[in-house]
């Protein structure tokens, strides 16, 4: 069985995240979503809220997906779950430059390879940060995030 790890802050999960995760589920037997506590970012939703949103979004694949919040080194989390590959979605060249360095570091620390999955062009402009900014300023995120995330964002910014 091949297990892939998709790490991210998912604050909040966007349609781009959902697309990459669904594509991973079509390739790998088992997918672990690592909800990262990023100390360099101020989260809008706590890790329990983000995990709950992802669990609801992927409830139909619950037998093939594990969703877990964590802090610390990604490679330690990956080793604990016997992950075969780390999967990172890429939107642009700027993502590649950052993610390549992370992939090389992770491989040197653990021997675990990273697979880069280009995002669907339909979602290439999306980022959680931009979605939050749009909603904070009164715009609609209906085409950017799943409906349950739209509701959570509206409640948070009400």
Image (cartoon, helix red, strand yellow):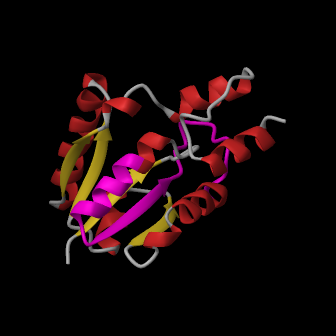
Relative to 6, 139 lies left or right = right
Relative horizontal placement of residue 107, taking residue 90 as reference (left or right):
left
* Image quarter of residue 154: top right
Is 124 or 83 nearer to us in this picture?
Answer: 124
Q: Quadrant of the N terminus?
A: bottom left
The part of the chain drawn in magenta is: 19-47
Whether 9 is among the magenta residues is no
Q: Nearer the viewer, residue 9 or 38?
A: 9
Q: Residue 105 appears at what percent x and percent y?
A: 22, 46
Residue 60 locus on image (x, y percent): 48, 71
- Let me know if residue 43 is in the magenta part: yes
**Dividing the image into 4 quarters, which one contains the C terminus?**
top right
View extreme (top): residue = 137
| Percent position of residue 56, x then y | 59, 64
Up-down: is 6 above or below 65?
A: above
Q: Residue at x 42, y 25 (%)?
A: 125
Up-down relation of residue 143 to residue 46 (above or below): above
Q: Position of residue 57 (x, y in %)?
A: 54, 59
Using the image as rendered, state which of residue 147 and residue 34 is in the foreground: 147
Q: With respect to residue 13, does 70 lie above or below?
A: below
The quadrant where residue 99 appears: top left
What residue is at 27 percent from the left and 52 percent from the top? 87
Q: How many marks?
A: 0
Q: Report the residue at 52% width, 69% height from top.
A: 59
């Amino acid at each position: 069985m091949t297990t892939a790890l998709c790490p991210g802050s998912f604050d909040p999960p966007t349609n781009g995240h959902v697309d990459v995760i669904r594509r991973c589920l079509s390739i790998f037997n088992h997918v672990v979503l690592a909800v990262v506590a990023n100390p360099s970012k101020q989260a809008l939703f706590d890790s329990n809220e983000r995990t709950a949103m992802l669990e609801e979004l992927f409830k139909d694949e619950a037998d093939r997906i594990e969703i877990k919040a964590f802090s610390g080194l990604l490679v330690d989390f990956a080793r604990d779950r016997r992950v075969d590959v780390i999967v990172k979605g890429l939107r642009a060249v700027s993502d590649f430059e950052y993610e390549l360095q992370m992939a090389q570091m992770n491989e040197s620390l653990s021997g675990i390879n990273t697979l880069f999955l280009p995002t669907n062009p339909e979602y290439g402009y999306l980022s959680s940060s931009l979605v939050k900014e749009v909603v904070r300023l009164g715009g609609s995120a209906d085409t950017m995030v799943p409906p349950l995330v739209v509701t959570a964002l509206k409640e948070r910014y009400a």
